[in-house]
Image (cartoon, rainbow, N blue to C red):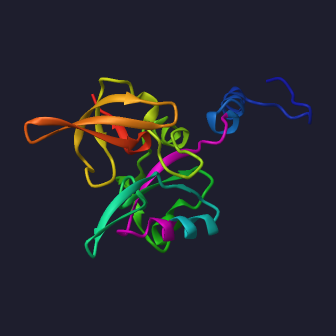
Amino acid sequence: MPPTAEGRHVSSAEKTTTNATALSPETTAAPAIRWYAASVFPGKEHVAERHLRMQGFQPFVPRCEKTVRHARRLETRSAAYFPGYMFIALDLGLQRWRSVNGTFGVRSLVTQGDRPLPVPSGLVERFIALTGKDGLLDFSGGLAAGASVRILSGPLAETIGRLDRLDPAGRARVLVAIMNGEIPVDLDARDLVAIA
């Protein structure tokens, strides 16, 4: 056995253990931050988001404009794109992730067994990239004349149509099939999403 710098002899088993420790992924890898989904109480996404931020977590709630009929009038407001769910960036090895389940507004993290289940890589990052300065998702990047589109808000919300034209100012004309004919409807391009 060769002597160490301190003058003691090291066995081959100790050398193997020392080398494995020095090269272990835990010590050489970057932080393992991943996005996880959490179930929240209906309509409490903003409450849960605020309380998670106060605890030092990084939550993200994708939002879109939603048209709601109330007292015989239509009102457009910001709403969660996935009602009842939000995303949270966590490093399970470093953060006290179990405290998320006790946060006001949060039901629980989506788990598999007793561990949180990460969302597919790149999904939340894509939603963040599609979020405009107003904090709303903007899917208009994939729109092209002739494409089938779904209207997201307004009196024709959830209606499928065909995009007739799109101008640089963000206005779109959609042909909607109503009563055996196609009716042209002028909309904001942010209110449309291309469908396959």
Is residue 92 shown to the viewer in this render? no
Tell me residue 30's x, y (percent).
Answer: 67, 37
Instruction: Locate residue 168, reporting x and y percent.
Output: 51, 31
Residue 58 place in picture, x, y as percent: 59, 56
Q: Residue at x 32, y 54 (%)?
A: 154
Q: Nearer the viewer, residue 175 or 51?
A: 175
Q: Which residue appears at 87% of the width and 30% of the height?
A: 4
Do we see residue 171 in this rendering? yes
Q: Nearer the viewer, residue 98 or 141?
A: 141
Residue extending furthest left? 180
Question: Residue 44: within the magenta?
Answer: yes
Does 93 sit left or right of 193 as displayed?
A: right
User: Residue 145 or 29: which is nearer the viewer?
Assistant: 145
* Foreground of the two, 170 or 112: 170
Q: Write down the quadrant of residue 150 in the picture.
A: top left
Which residue range is magenta in the image?
Answer: 29-48
